Image: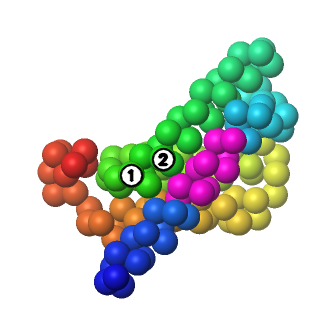
Amino acid sequence: MHTFKKAEWVLRIAVAGEFIGHGVFALQGKKDWIGWFANFGVADVGVAAQLLFLVGLLDILVAILILIRPVRIVLLWMALWGFWTALIRPLVGMPIWDFIERFANWGAPLALLLLLGWPKNLNEWFG
């Protein structure tokens, strides 16, 4: 197998694993994460739990999609979502190191996107 393809598969598996792992935690209703919703205006715990469940489903779906076919717009979403979810930690009062430690959460999908090539037109984002 060519080195490029090996690197692509390593990143696809890494990205999928990260999103499946976080997705499962979200489906399980990780207590800390439910509590973070209050920092962003969602004070009702039941609503926060439902939103977190939907986020978990989306995380798992995009992870599976990346294993089947790496779609660039989905990788961009994963990079942005990974950055945001890492950034949430210091925003809710955790140490900055919790953000820094999660650089791979957004760096791996961004690396895969760049490895596949930055799209030159709208069709390439979805192709």
Q: Amino acid at mark 1?
A: Ile
Q: Which residue is mark 1?
A: 68
Tell me the residue at 25%/45% (across/down). 126
In the rendered image, residue 78, in percent from the top left (x then y), is placed at 48, 49
Q: Which residue is mark 2?
A: 64
Element class at badge 2? helix
Left or right: residue 110 compared with residue 5: right
Which portion, as a residue range, is magenta?
15-24
Choose between 32 and 60: the one closer to the eye.
60
Tell me the residue at 42%/46% (across/down). 65
| Vertical arrangement, residue 85 with respect to residue 108, above or below | above
Task: Using a 10 Å C-alpha cutoff, classify the residue at mark 1 as few (fewer than 14 neighbours), some (14 to 19) or many (20 or more).
Answer: few
* Figure disc tally: 2
Q: Amino acid at mark 2?
A: Ile
Magenta span: chief secondary structure = helix
Left or right: residue 108 compared with residue 101: left
Choose between 21 and 34: the one closer to the eye.
21
Tell me the residue at 22%/49% (across/down). 127
Element class at badge 1? helix
Q: Quadrant of residue 57?
A: top right
Q: Quadrant of residue 114?
A: bottom left
Left or right: residue 71 compared with residue 43: left
| Vertical arrangement, residue 86 with respect to residue 25, above or below | below
In the rendered image, residue 59, in percent from the top left (x then y), is placed at 56, 41
In magenta segment, residue 69: no
Gap in angstroms between the C-alphas marked 2 and 1: 6 Å
